[in-house]
Amino acid sequence: MPLWQLPSLLNAIYSSFPSIPFSAATNFTTLADYCEHFAETIIECHDLALKMAPCGRLSTCLALLRPTLGEPIPPHLIDRFTVDVLPDVLPEFTPDADLLCDYCLALAQVLLGRSLLPETETTLTGLLCDLVWYFADGLKAPRWIRTTDGVQPCQ
């Protein structure tokens, strides 16, 4: 990107962040939407310095969400989570093996840097272990099944 375009990019990326108000009173679905917005901005931005604002906002949203995760869904939101027919596809975490390996490698490298707060290091260590176990299970999972019709791929 030419340097002359940088100021307009900065304005486009960051102009919306201060105007997105949220607090501990913001409902969890709105906070989740904001988290998605900030994460999308972070992943689309390739300049480390430019990622700081959306990363900070994401961190704040997550910190507000964390203590509410065990709470029941408020009565006024129950209808939003009620359906007559389940969707064909439910959300699941299914990165391909290459991406999952990259996630594990990146976390291992961050942990090797030893520049984290102890509680952050503990959390990232747990995440690394969970990702590695998920990754290894996927690599070692059966790919085919013997049937009366012969060997078939697992679905």
Image (cartoon, grey):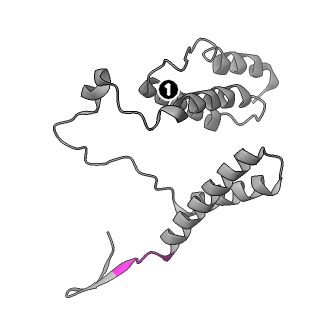
Q: Residue 37 location in percent, x, y?
A: 53, 28
The local crowd at label 1, few if under 14, some if 14 to 19, many if 20 or more residues have their Cα within 10 Å, is many
Quarter occupied by residue 117 = top right
Rendered position, 44 above or below 145: above
Total marks in image: 1
Residue bearing mark 1: 31
Rendered position, 114 above or below 20: below
Q: Amino acid at mark 1?
A: Leu
Rendered position, 101 above or below 66: below
Please tell me whether residue 143 belongs to the stretch shown in magenta: yes
Element at label 1: helix
**Residue at (75% x, 30% y) in the render:** 1
Q: 80 or 100: nearer the eye?
A: 80
Q: 133 or 139: nearer the eye?
A: 133
Q: 91 or 14: nearer the eye?
A: 91
**Residue at (50% x, 71% y) in the render:** 137
Q: Magenta: predominant secondary structure element?
A: loop
Q: Is residue 81 left or right of residue 33?
A: left
Q: Residue 30 location in percent, x, y?
A: 45, 23
Rendered position, 64 above or below 126: above
User: Which residue range is magenta in the image?
Assistant: 140-144
Q: Is residue 22 left or right of residue 72?
A: right
**Residue at (80% x, 57% y) in the render:** 112
Quadrant where the image shows the C terminus = bottom left
**Residue at (76% x, 52% y) in the render:** 110
